[in-house]
Amino acid sequence: MTDVESSIRRFIVREIMFQEDESILKYDDLLLDSGIIDSVGITSLVLFLEEEFDVSIPLEYLVPKNFTTIEAIANLLKEWPVESHQ
């Protein structure tokens, strides 16, 4: 588990699931398939990611496969040609 993954999990649990206990969400839980995140949740998550990690996520990366799990989201931030606001 990385700091990025922990931050993403914390946001999803607290701001999307409206829970406090982060242990209810595992890093490999299927976020879309299980209904944990819907289109509104993805919008909130993308805004969080852009602000928290100071990036701009291009529209072509806003596809379901990039948001399947916390690990997939963290990998998205690591692997794609993200534009930094710095």
Image (cartoon, rainbow, N blue to C red):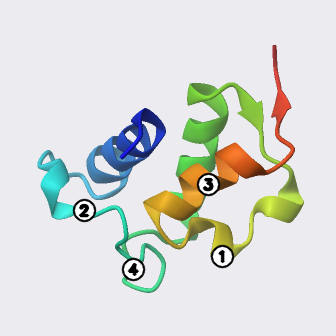
| Residue 32, x across and y down, in percent | 48, 78
Checking the image for residue 75, the label placed there is 3
Q: Residue at x 45, y 86 (%)?
A: 33
Q: Are marks 2 and 3 in contact (CB under 8 Å)?
A: no
Of 56 and 16, nearer the camera is 56
Name the amino acid, label 3: Asn
**Earlier-in-chain disc, 2 versus 1:** 2
Residue contact between numbered discs 2 and 1, judged by CB atoms under 8 Å: no
Give the distance between the C-alpha atoms of the residues marked 1 and 4, in whole angstroms: 14 Å
Which is more toward the observer, 19 or 85? 85
Q: CA distance from mark 2 to mark 1?
A: 18 Å
Cα–Cα gap, marks 1 and 3: 11 Å
Classify mark 3: helix, strand or loop.
Answer: helix
Name the residue at 69% across, 25% down. Answer: 54
Give the residue number, with chain letter if any, for mark 2: 25
Left or right of 78? Residue 41 is left
Proximity of marks 4 and 2: CB atoms separated by less than 8 Å: no
Residue identified by numbered label 1: 65
**Residue at 37 percent of width and 70 percent of height:** 28
Indicate the secondary structure of the residue bearing disc 1.
Answer: helix
Q: Which dot, 4 or 2, sits closer to the camera? A: 2
Q: Which mark is residue 32?
A: none
* Amino acid beneath label 4: Gly
Work out how far the residue at label 4 is from the one at label 2, CA to CA, in angstroms.
12 Å
Q: Residue at x 56, y 50 (%)?
A: 74
Which badge, 4 or 2, comes first in the chain's sequence? 2
Q: Which residue is mark 4?
A: 35
Towards the viewer: 79 or 29? 79
Circle 4 or circle 3, nearest the eye = 3
Between circles 1 and 4, the one closer to the viewer is 1
Residue type highlighted by circle 2: Leu
